[in-house]
Image: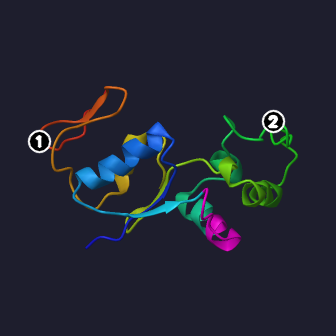
Amino acid sequence: MTDIIIYHNSDCGTSRNTLALIRNAGIEPHVVEYLKTPPARVLLEQLIDRAGITPRELLREKGTPYADLGLGDEGHTDSALVDAMMAHPVLINRPLVVSPLGVRLCRPSEAVLDILPARQLGAFTKEDGEQVVDANGNRVRA
């Protein structure tokens, strides 16, 4: 049994594709709907650190209060950006996936393949029609 966690938003196509790729490897992950159950601050900071990204790289702009909060201003500290994500979880970009092989912001969704400990069981085509895994379970590279 492989322990995988996905911080998921079912309204997001990238998040849905990532979840489907995890399942295509025969893994049923723990799904955390982070808009309903946001991670605690210390956990969010750990996820950012483990993913090797900055809080700014985790910020989502589209469909969020990013502009209204002036978050494009480069003068904001990492702590202030995390404060904003804690106050407005919709600012947390998705999906974040935690596996025994690491933590990754899976944009694009096929980035999850780099941290899955199991092979894909068959072909996979994203919702937009792009094939990312062939019938033999191998990643298709453009």
Find out whether residue 38 is within the magenta segment. Answer: yes
- Give x and y (percent) for residue 133: 23, 38
Q: Residues within 10 Å of mark 2 (few under 14, many from 20)?
A: few
Q: Which residues are magenta?
A: 35-45
State which quadrant residue 102 falls in: bottom left
**Relative vertical location of residue 17 with respect to residue 27 in this rendering, above or below:** above
Evaluate if marks 2 and 1 touch, with contact meaning CB atoms under 8 Å apart: no
Tell me: residue 140, above or below residue 48.
above
Applied colour scheme: rainbow
Query: Which label's residue is closer to the chain start, 2 or 1?
Result: 2
Looking at the image, residue 30 lies above or below residue 94:
below
Give the quarter of the image for residue 128: top left
Residue on which the image places disc 1:
136
Residue type at tag 2: Ala
Where's residue 7, x and y in %? Answer: 51, 58
Q: What numbered label is drawn on residue 53? A: none
Which residue lies at the image location 24% right of the left edge and 50% below the top edge?
Answer: 24
Secondary element under disc 2, as helix, strand or loop, is loop
Q: Nearer the viewer, residue 49 or 39?
A: 39
Distance from label 2 to label 1 (Cα)? Answer: 44 Å
How many numbered markers are drawn? 2
- Which residue is depicted at the point 50% across and 41% down? 12
Residue lying at the far left in this picture: please name it.
Answer: 136
Residue at 67% of width from left, 49% of height from top? Answer: 90
Please give the residue where the numbered disc 2 appears in the rendered image. Answer: 67
Is residue 103 in sight in this rendering?
no
Per the image, is 44 magenta?
yes
